[in-house]
Image (cartoon, rainbow, N blue to C red):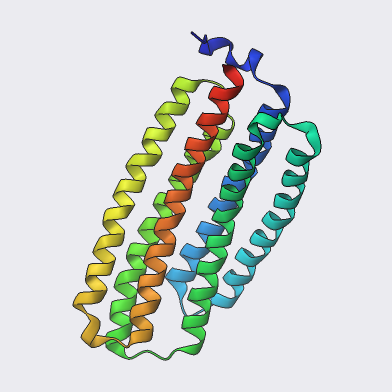
Amino acid sequence: MVNYNFLKRILVVGEKNLLSRLSVYPLMGIESSSNLILMLKNAPSDVEKYNEIVRSIEKKGDEMDIDFRHEVTSGAISSSLMDNLLDLIEKCDDILDKTYFTSREINRFNIHYKMTEEEKNVRDHAYDSFITILEANKKSLDFVHSILNENDLSKMKEDRKNIEAIEEQVDEIKDNIIDFTYLNSTKISYLVFEHLNTLAHKLDDLLDDCEDISDLVFTIMLAVTS
C-alpha cells in the first residue's frame, strides 16, 4: 500500500513538475470566467473589450499548449504516460478554447442582434443563470488547480468529489435554462433561442472538462506511484 504521506518523495520528478506547471491553466480559466461574467452583467456595453481580454488569454494558452506537447513528446516524460498527459494538456487548453468561444458568441449576438423588450427580459433571466454557472466554474477550477499541485491522494479524492458535486448542480441549472427558453420560445426569435441554448451547453461543458481533468490527473498520479 502506498504511504500517501511520502507520496511526494516517490513521484517521478518530470511528471510531477509538469502537472504543477499545468496548474496555470485553471488560473487562466478563472480569469477568463471572470471576464465572461462581466460581459454578461454589462451586455451590450463593453462586450468587445472583454472579448479581447478572453481572446488574449486563449492565445497565450495555445502557445503554452504547443510547448507542453513538445516537452511530453520529446522524451522528457515517461512514454507509458504520454497519452494521458497529452489528453490532460488538451483538456486544460480546451477550457480556454471554450471560454473564448463563449465570449465570441456573447459579443457577436449583443453587437449584431437588436432585441425586443420581451427578448431582453428572457435574455437577462438566462444570463443571470449563466453567471451562476460561471461562478460555479471558478470554484471548480480552483479545485482543479489544487489537484494539479496535490501530493496527497486522499485530498485529491476529496477535491474530485467537490468537482463532481458542482458539476451535478450545474447540470440542473443548465436543464432549467433550457426548459425556460422552450417555455418562452413564442416570445423570442430563433436566433435568441439558439444563442441561449448554445451558451447553456457550452458553459456546462466547462464543468465536464474540470471533471475530466481531475480524473486524468488521478490516473497519472496512480501510475507514477504504483
Instruction: Write the residue at 33% across / 74% down.
Output: 124
| Residue 139, x across and y down, in percent | 44, 45
Furthest residue to the left? Answer: 183
Q: Quadrant of the C terminus?
A: top right
Instruction: Write the residue at 70% across / 31% down.
Output: 79
Quadrant of res 61? bottom right
- State whether residue 135 is above or below residue 192: above
Q: Nearer the viewer, residue 2 or 29?
A: 2
Can I make out residue 27 in this image? no
Q: Nearer the viewer, residue 175 or 113?
A: 175
Furthest residue to the front? Answer: 80
Tell whether 87 sits left or right of 61. Answer: left
| Residue 101, x across and y down, in percent | 54, 68
| Residue 102, x across and y down, in percent | 50, 68
Instruction: Write the residue at 64% across / 32% down.
Output: 81
Quadrant of res 121? bottom left
- State whether residue 194 is above or below residue 70: below
- State whether residue 2 is above or below residue 92: above
Quadrant of res 180? bottom left
